[in-house]
Image (cartoon, rainbow, N blue to C red):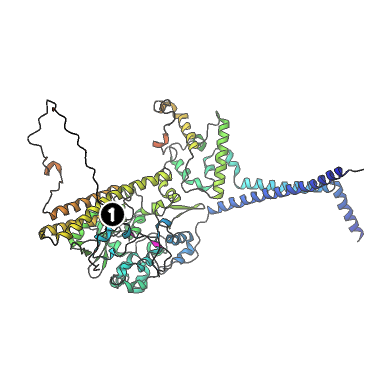
Amino acid sequence: MTTPADEKSTTTTRRLTWLLPAAFFVIGALITGIVVALLMNIAQRKAEGTQPFFQVVQLTETSFDPAEWGKNFPAQYEGWKNTTQMLDDDKATPPAGDPRAFMAKSKLAEDPRLITMWQGYAFSVEYNHPRGHANMLLDQQLIKRVQAPFKQPGACLNCHASVPEVLYKLNPTDPAAAWAKMNVTPYADATKLAEHPVSCIDCHDPKTMALRVTRPAFVEGIKAYKASLGVANYDVNTMATNNEMRAFVCAQCHVEYYFKGDAKTLTFPWKNGLTASNALDYYDSVGFSDFTNTLTGAKMLKAQHPDYETWSQGVHAANGVTCADCHMPYTRQGAVKVSDHQVRSPLWDDNQINKSCLTCHHETEAVMRARVEGIQSTWKTQQSKSFDALDQLIRDINAAQGNGTPQANIDAARQWQRKAQFFQDYTVSENSKGFHAPQYSLSLVNEATDAARRGQLALRGISEPMTVDPAKDYTPMKATPAPAPSTTAPATPAPAVTPTPIVNPVYSPAAPGATPSK
Amino acid sequence: MGRAGQNGKDAVERLYLAVGGLRGLLFVVGSALVGVLAGIMVFTFGYANGLAYFGDEATTCKQCHSMNKQFDAWSKGSHHTLACQECHSPEKATLPVQWLVSEADNGFWHSLKFTTGDYPLNIKIRDHNKEIVRVNCLRCHGNLVSQIEQPALHASAQIDCLRCHSEVGHKR
């Protein structure tokens, strides 16, 4: 006779007989699944190490569209396309009717002293932070500096478009003639020929993928610079080393330049060397100025973005660390390392710091970030003080023009403004916030401050000597008569002096009276 | 149904009974499945050259390509006659337990990180592994640097040999 309890126990046992194998089956299947997945993963990792490149299309000298190159080099193309990306903190909302989803923040709003120093020049109207390569053409077409009333030459396209295509459209057989034509064509017309921002063919030979220079201005500029070092007839595309090319292709654009004469020939001021002083000497010797500051009447230079020249004065350049090493670091794709074509700041995020800085600097990401930001904030503090000096010189010259100050004093002050402003502009327009060559950048700031203060003194008719060699051209000042060492203590101690704290008034933007002329 | 069919059915039934009925059949199928799994596991282990991980050849450490750079640098360094573990593991002869724990710990994390791909381009040594290396520096060079080390003075902040001698193990 069976009790209900026995029956229940039998049912449980019977259920167990089925549940147990079922559970084992599921567990067995899971383990098998995981092991097979691991096997596939190992196979995939092994395969990654073997075949890095598949040629899909044949690239030629007329393969202007980067998407074509992307078929052969998908990782590089993906990176290049990603240069449209921005960090959220850097984004600004474009004005109504602007086709862009977001744009870079205004540098003028950040530091209105720029508006004062560029009175009479288009830069005082709109000047923004830089954005990624893929944005360069659209950003230029939309900036107020190229729109009415301003008239800009097609030479501007040299660094805001993929130039080989523009030249090909202008003259498929004679690139030199095409380049000359592009430079003088009004910007509004020339830009219609531009299809792409800087892309693959601007830096790479389509047959071999080797780096090559495509900009005539750099070919001439580096030739002049090498000549100053004693190397005659330098031809960059045949004589440069591979490592030099890793900076040269970038230096086609990230440099100080001017448009020479009525032909608007893009020219780099490198005949005397690569420093700001060398450039100023060059411009003085050829009598060039970009504009006249309408507040002071001084003939001004507009420094552009001398990233290459500044880098060349620093410790990284001295050690053969080029643009590509930090801004296009190798990135891992399976077993293959790909140069990161999303060109950007190494400080973008910790992963980027790891890929660039940590290749040589055996430190943590946080330590490297702190080191770079420390250099930048030191530069920023000094640069701001220097900018005050320049701003005060501009205001002083402006006031002096109507108050009977001798013309000779005003002319001398204008010369100082030219120097102070060029140096100030040089280091402000440079894109590394003083990092590419920290000591050099601080020296530029110091030169700018000195020039501005000397300009203010010049207005007052004072010309202070400049000590070049203290051992030869300097006489120490000595107190007369020489103070005798006191033997007796004074009867009553002198009252303690409380120093007055220095409080400076805060900057208020200049009311720009003059309208930009260019 | 023909005679042959009848015989065949009998044979199947006899086999069924021979293996022990339903339970026996399940056991046989189950064993076969375990065998399949074991086979796949052994194959995977062999395919991944898993046996190498029980030896001390330096080439083992770059079986996955993520350590190519470290391997190349090691082969140029002054310590290239020593196996990786001589510096990177506790001494096997005197500290067998610590040695095993360290091998298992690093082996597990290396496998996981490499399989998922979740690791940076420039890999960094962890602090406790750095300490293992430091101890191993002293294992050979201890007498030479005993005056520098001064453990009584720097008990909480040991001098990091590699801060200056960063290229003895891996030369760039």
- Examine the rendered structure and indicate whether residue A35 appears above or below residue B85: below
Please name the amino acid that badge 1 sits on. Thr
Task: Answer with left or right where residue A77 lies relative to residue A310.
Answer: right
Judge left or right: residue A73 versus residue A248.
right
Mark yes or no: residue A231 visible.
no
Percent across and percent down for residue A190 are: 33, 72
Q: Is residue A99 magenta?
A: yes
The image quarter containing residue B144 is top left
Task: Chain letter for mark 1, please.
Answer: A
Image quadrant in which the N terminus of chain A is located: top right
Q: Position of residue A482 (x, y in %)?
A: 9, 33
Q: Which residues are magenta?
A: A98-106
For the point 44% across and 43% down, the residue is B73
In the rendered picture of this protein, how many numbered marks are placed on residues? 1
Q: Quadrant of the C terminus of chain A?
A: bottom left
Find disc 1 in the rendering and name its residue: A427
Q: Nearer the viewer, residue A72 or B29?
A: B29
Q: Is residue A143 above or below residue A344?
A: below
- Is residue A391 shown left or right of residue A130? left
Rendered image quadrant of residue A298? bottom left
Q: Is residue A397 among what the camera can see?
A: yes
Q: Residue A331 magenta-drawn?
A: no
Secondary element at tag 1: helix
Q: Is residue A387 above or below residue A295?
A: above
* Residue A187, image x, y percentages: 31, 71
- Residue B42 percent across, percent down from the top left: 66, 45
Task: Label the magenta part by its dominant secondary structure.
Answer: loop
